[in-house]
Image (spheres, rainbow, N blue to C red):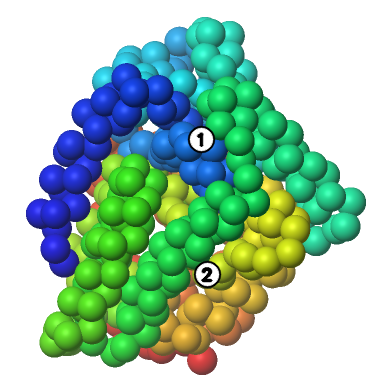
């Protein structure tokens, strides 16, 4: 992939944003999980940045001065980033949109609020994705977010601007989807690590640049000869979260000779499976696309069966022979669900390995041992 162009863009992005801020553009941060429509932020003339850094034990441990260990390492890392101020994005944002999803992320916004005087909008997320009342509530909250952004930026958010934003982000989702689907082919064009890094970059890069970049990556990949991975087992990665920088499991699987060919993760990666309808009442469209029509995360009621069926479909479409379930310490919703998934996948002869990370360096040895053993077990098998 044309990495240098993207690396240069991301290297220069903080300086670009600082210059934009000097000229009056607001930088609006939000937390991942795909419940904050970037379209509304972009349509306000602000620059949206998804704050998704993860994997750092330094950041997760820094938060232990203000929250207990029972808060998951990703949520603690968001607190640590704000306390230690090492990442430019966490310090340059003018306002935070905090989606109230699980208890852990909710705690992050409360701690930021106690310790900072940052402007914040808490976006209530219903814990049921398939009800009319919940859809109306969520659409209403998106309308309130629109009002807040208009007042904060001084710019009107018109239907025309929202429509332009939906078109831009549909292109981004569509290109990520097309690139991802190339991995259904038997031979490999790029690794899961390449794809997740590309997806993560879409949270930080200028979206117009990113669409252009993804388009050129897609064209390049279509012409690239695939590389056979021999007997490397094809794997599906499931779990709650993979932060920007949390690449240990992807690296260990690759080093062990496995090939993750598709991921289904709630947080940290941009959701790209479907587009937002760009007609009619656009706030209703956004509400449907970001709540009702998408795959629900595990904190939602009635989500498990829907997510299980989708995982089975992925396993079949991508011809995988095993599943890696990667969760973070104390993520109770996904931890509870992992038992159901392991049992039901086992009934279908699809082996599943459950891994848990605390972001600590001591995790690496046991993770490596378990991944190495799992890859040996699944070599040769294919899910039915
Ligand atoms: S990893 Fe789990 S506990 Fe942590 S923020 Fe995500 S959903 Fe919440």
Instruction: Give the residue displayed 34% in from the left and 54% down from the top.
Output: 208
Q: Is 183 or 344 nearer to us in this picture?
A: 183
Regarding mark 1 in the picture, which secondary structure is present there? Answer: strand
Q: Would you place residue 373 above or below residue 317 in this image?
A: above
Q: Quadrant of residue 228?
A: bottom left
On the image, the x and y values in percent for residue 138 come to: 76, 46
The residue positioned 80% from the left and 53% from the top of the image is 135
The residue indicated by pointer 1 is: 30
* Residue 72 seen: no
Query: x%, y% of residue 1?
Result: 16, 66
Q: Pinpoint residue 288: horizontal percent, then vertical percent.
A: 71, 60
Q: Is residue 314 above or below residue 100?
A: below
Q: Is residue 66 left or right of residue 191?
A: right
| Residue at 40% from the left image edge and 23% from the top image edge | 24
- According to the picture, the residue beneath numbered tag 2 turns out to be 273
Vertical comparison of 324 with 148: above or below: below
In the rendered view, tell whether residue 286 sits above or below residue 235.
above
**Which residue is pictured at 14% across the width and 54% down the height?**
5
Mark 1 or mark 2: whose residue is earlier in sequence: 1
Relative side of 83 to 167, left or right:
left
Residue closest to the far right: 133
Q: Is residue 66 visible?
A: yes
Q: Secondary structure at mark 2?
A: loop
Q: Residue furthest left?
A: 4
**Where residue 374 appears, x then y in whole percent?**
34, 68
Q: Are circles 1 and 2 on residues that touch, CB within 8 Å?
A: no
Tell me if mark 2 has few (under 14), some (14-19) or many (20+) residues whose alpha carbon lies within 10 angstroms of its own: some
């Amino acid at each position: 992939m044309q990495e240098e162009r993207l690396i240069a863009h991301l290297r220069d992005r903080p300086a670009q944003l600082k210059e934009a801020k000097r000229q009056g553009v607001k930088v609006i941060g939000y937390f991942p999980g795909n419940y904050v429509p970037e379209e509304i932020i972009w349509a306000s003339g602000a620059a949206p940045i998804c704050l998704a850094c993860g994997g750092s034990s330094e950041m997760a441990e820094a938060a232990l001065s203000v929250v207990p260990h029972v808060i998951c390492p990703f949520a603690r890392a968001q607190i640590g980033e704000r306390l230690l101020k090492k990442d430019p994005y966490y310090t340059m944002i003018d306002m935070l949109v905090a989606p109230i999803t699980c208890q852990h992320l909710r705690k992050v916004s409360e701690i930021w609020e106690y310790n900072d005087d940052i402007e914040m909008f808490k976006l209530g997320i219903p814990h049921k994705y398939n009800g009319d009342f919940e859809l109306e509530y969520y659409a209403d909250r998106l309308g309130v977010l629109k009002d807040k952004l208009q007042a904060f930026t001084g710019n009107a958010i018109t239907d025309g601007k929202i429509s332009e934003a939906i078109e831009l982000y549909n292109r981004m989702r569509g290109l990520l989807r097309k690139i991802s689907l190339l991995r259904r082919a038997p031979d490999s064009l790029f690794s899961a690590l390449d794809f997740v890094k590309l997806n993560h970059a879409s949270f930080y890069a200028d979206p117009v640049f990113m669409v252009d970049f993804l388009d050129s990556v897609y064209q390049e990949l279509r012409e690239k000869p695939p590389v056979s991975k021999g007997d490397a087992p094809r794997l599906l990665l499931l779990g709650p979260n993979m932060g920007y920088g949390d690449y240990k499991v992807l690296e260990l699987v690759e080093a062990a000779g496995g090939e993750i060919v598709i991921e289904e993760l709630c947080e940290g990666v941009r959701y790209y499976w479907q587009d937002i309808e760009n007609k009619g009442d656009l706030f209703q469209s956004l509400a449907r696309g970001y709540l009702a029509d998408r795959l629900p995360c595990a904190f939602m009621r009635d989500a498990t069966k829907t997510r299980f069926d989708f995982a089975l479909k992925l396993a079949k479409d991508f011809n995988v022979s095993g599943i890696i379930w990667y969760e973070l310490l104390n993520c109770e919703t996904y931890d509870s669900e992992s038992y159901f998934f392991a049992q039901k996948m086992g009934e279908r002869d699809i082996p599943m390995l459950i891994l848990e990370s605390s972001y600590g360096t001591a995790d690496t040895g046991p993770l490596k041992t378990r991944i190495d053993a799992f890859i040996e077990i699944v070599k040769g098998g294919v899910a039915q």
